[in-house]
Image (cartoon, grey):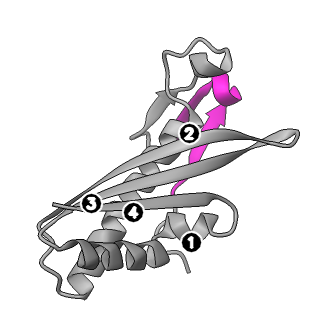
Amino acid sequence: MALYTAQAHVTGGRAGHGETSDGLLKVDLAMPKELGGPGGATNPEQLFAVGYAACFESAVRFIARKQKLPLEDAAITSTVSLLPNGEGFKLGVALAVKTKGLDQAAAEALVSEAHNVCPYSNAIKGNIDVALSVRAV
């Protein structure tokens, strides 16, 4: 049984509009200028980047609490790239994780464990390459 279910409706694809069933998120979508579009609105890659970063940071904090680590703060910069893949396309992801309150080795171990429990990481495992970098400050 699901703990939570989100639902969204999109019309017009990459040049359309999307919103969640609760009405809290309403976004216009546009092809980025880099892909020949007009830009000026969000796109699926940006939405994925925000969702993954938010989910991954929550996983980092979850593991830190579970392991009783002295994590003071964490921040994630998520980069999602659209890449060619034969006749189609694929995504590539880089997550840059910055932690405060841990040494480098502890931060790296924390991020590795967070990657194992993050729902986004588990959803794309084996399908999308994810590069992780960690900086403890």
Q: Position of 57 compared to 84: left or right?
A: left
Q: Earlier in the sequence, mark 3 or mark 2?
A: 2
Magenta region:
6-21
Q: Amino acid at mark 1?
A: Asn
Q: CA distance from mark 3 to mark 2?
A: 24 Å
For mark 2, what is the residue?
45
- Residue sitting nearer the eye, 3 or 94: 94
Q: Secondary structure at mark 2?
A: helix
Tag 2: Cα neighbours inside 10 Å, few (<14), some, or many (≥20)? some
Can you say which quadrant of the picture contains the C terminus?
A: bottom left
Can you say which quadrant of the picture contains the N terminus?
A: bottom right
Q: Earlier in the sequence, mark 4 or mark 2?
A: 2
Q: CA distance from mark 4 to mark 2?
A: 16 Å
Q: Are marks 4 and 2 in contact (CB under 8 Å)?
A: no
Q: Is residue 130 above or below residue 79?
A: below
For mark 4, what is the residue?
56
For mark 1, what is the residue?
122
Q: CA distance from mark 2 to mark 1?
A: 18 Å
Magenta stretch encompasses residue 37: no
Q: Earlier in the sequence, mark 4 or mark 1?
A: 4
Please name the residue shown 57% across and 45% down the image. 8
Q: Is residue 66 above or below residue 124?
A: below
Please name the residue shown 32% across and 58% down the image. 97
Q: x and y percent of residue 27 in the render?
A: 48, 29
Give the quadrant of residue 133.
bottom left
The extreme top residue here reads 38
Please name the residue shown 21% across and 81% down the image. 65
Q: Earlier in the sequence, mark 2 or mark 1?
A: 2
Q: x and y percent of residue 59 in the render?
A: 36, 70
| Residue 105 visible from this viewpoint | yes
Q: Secondary structure at mark 1?
A: helix
Please name the residue shown 40% across and 80% down the image. 113
